Image (cartoon, rainbow, N blue to C red):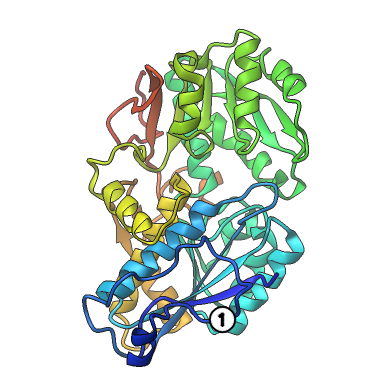
Amino acid sequence: MKQIGRVLLAVLAAVLLAAGVTACGSGDEESTGGASVASTPAVPCKGEPVVLGTITSLGGPAPLKDIMGGVEAAAAAVNHDCTAGRPIELVTCNDEGSQSRGADCGREIVSSGAIGLVGSGGVASVSFEPIVQGAGIPSIGNLSTDPTELAALTSFPFYSGLTRIAARSSLHHAAGAKSVSIVVPDNPVLQTLYDTMEEVCEEFGVEIDQFIPIPANATDMAQYASQAAESESIMILVDQQAEGVLRELLHLGVSPADMVISAPTLSQEEADEFGDEINGLYMTSPTVPLTDTDNEGVAQYMAETEAIGVDDHGVDGMVAWRAMHVVADVIKTLPNPTADSLKEAMDTYAFAPPEAAPVDFAKLAFPDIKVFTEFRVYSREYAAWVIEEGKVELAAPPFLDPGTDFQL
């Protein structure tokens, strides 16, 4: 199966429009299955196309299909309305959660002529990000969990892993906890991040009792939950195994109010399976819940993904979707878009989307905290979610500053 797909979402010529063709490439390419524009662009989009890329995992140990779907949906909408001022050509690559595939994807993005990598992320980012960044291609809206992404000058994460750790630490502190055990993926690549997490947690009022690493192939969560249950409070940072850990902790009698998990790891559908059993469970997210369709940003994200048939939705997918819209807005201001000019424009770009915390690349988010100043962290606020009557709700008005004392 090919790992690279070139999806031309704009209709560039009348012959393509007449034939109904909106994607080019061989039939074994893989995307989310919905990247197409259903109708003639509302605004004629002329000019030389700009190539952008995205890399994530559609399979493997931690698939992130919502990321690919979010980027594809935004690209389709951008081309439909010509908001970038020229067509966007989106190059997609599925790294399958493999380091070797990730490196292949990085090289394919470089050879494609892409001027930016948009919304990418996953367990293989440590293999593709150095390749892309080494070619001078900025990575925008990336998940940013490994040291390369956190420090590289061509990296423009909206909501870095460190910001998310600060948010969870703040939430534990607000709930009255003094210490925490953290359930993490057993991944040597992330060890540097784990070391940094100790400093971050202490800055925001909690100490780490222990890290509890879970191998990617582990299926029985009982022993890991038993270790965590001995702690005052628990932070769950695994994705695919979060539901299993949560079930075992509940079986051991741990109160949901003593746990904080990452919002993307538990969807409303999964929460429905637990019902009232997880009332009081806290989650943190850079965004409001996806169930808040009264929010303008959430409503737009859902409409654009559904318009091209994307079935996988999530917080990371919505962040990646926003990243494509941000890049399109920036490209429109560039007379001759290149990787260098895109990076230069991003260096001072700021935005405050309705669905997520504000980002300002012109200034560090935590200039007074040394551990943060060593990395590219440009957003400090977050949304606190809680499960009430089996439903995901906001625990406090968004967005919260982890440096501000508050009580839940």
* The N terminus lies in quadrant: bottom right
Taking depth in this image into account, of 127 and 45 the one nearest to the observer is 45
Q: Which residue is labeled 1 in the image?
A: 25
Q: Position of residue 340 (x, y in %)?
A: 46, 81
Taking depth in this image into account, of 205 and 172 the one nearest to the observer is 172
Query: Label 1 is placed on what type of residue?
Result: Gly
Q: Position of residue 249 (x, y in %)?
A: 63, 16
Taking depth in this image into account, of 143 and 60 the one nearest to the observer is 60
Taking depth in this image into account, of 50 and 356 the one nearest to the observer is 50
Judged from this view, the residue extending furthest toward the front is 19
Q: Is residue 83 left or right of residue 254?
A: left
Q: Is residue 169 left or right of residue 337?
A: right
Task: Write down the quadrant of residue 320 in the picture.
Answer: bottom left
Judged from this view, the residue extending furthest toward the top is 253
Q: Taking 128 as reference, is 88 above or below it?
A: below
Q: Residue at x 63, y 36 (%)?
A: 238
Q: Taking 377 as reference, is 395 above or below it?
A: above
**Callout 1: SS:** loop
